[in-house]
Amino acid sequence: MSLSDEQHKIIDEFLNWVAATARQKVPLVGTTRKMEGQGDFPDCLAMRLYTDTRTWLEVNVLVSEPKLRIGLATDSRTRNEEGEQLIEDSKDTLDEFLELGLADAGYEDDVYKMEHFHESGIFYFATHLDTENIEAFAEEDGIRQKAMQVVEGYALAFEEMLDEDF
């Protein structure tokens, strides 16, 4: 899908909002960096919210769908295995593990599916959020608020692992 200049601007502003809001709401976020063309989605645009040099929270706009992929990502097999162990030790399913993080962030009523996969050298614990169109990313409520809820949920769900870096 080819983006118009206006759609590219909407996504760019959305990703800038993600970075600024995450820095306010998620103390573990340090450096942020925009990325383009990740993995199986060469037309994606993403914001990486680094918690260390090998692990980050990611908000990825999959332009062709359009949908968001939000979650924890790492290019380190060791960090991935630490995340897997954290979930296994909790005795929760992936979805329940994320629900606990969401509840800790104050979003007790929100339920999202978590997937765990490896793509193009990166390990993901991620949630997909559908949106009707690119223009939805410009709205103050709706997908923006859901996206930040999921970012906060992942940060708190994996806080024990991420805190090791500080």
Image: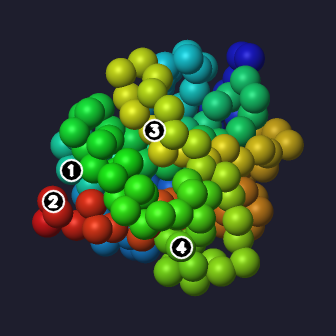
Label 2: how many Cα within 10 Å (few below 14, some 14–19, many 20+)? few
Check disc 3 and report its element: helix, strand or loop.
Answer: strand
Q: CA distance from mark 4 to mark 2?
A: 22 Å
At a point 76% along the width and 62% down the height, the residue shown is 142
Q: Earlier in the sequence, mark 4 or mark 2?
A: 4
Task: Report which residue position mark 4 lands on.
Answer: 100
Check disc 1 and report its element: helix, strand or loop.
Answer: loop
At a point 48% along the width and 45% down the height, the residue shown is 125
Task: Report which residue position mark 1 lands on.
Answer: 52
Query: Looking at the image, which is closer to me, 5 or 12?
Result: 12
Q: Is residue 78 left or right of residue 94?
A: left
> In this rendering, is residue 102 above or below 123?
below
Check disc 4 and report its element: helix, strand or loop.
Answer: helix
Q: CA distance from mark 2 to mark 3?
A: 19 Å
Q: CA distance from mark 1 to mark 3?
A: 15 Å
Q: Position of residue 3 (x, y in %)?
A: 70, 23
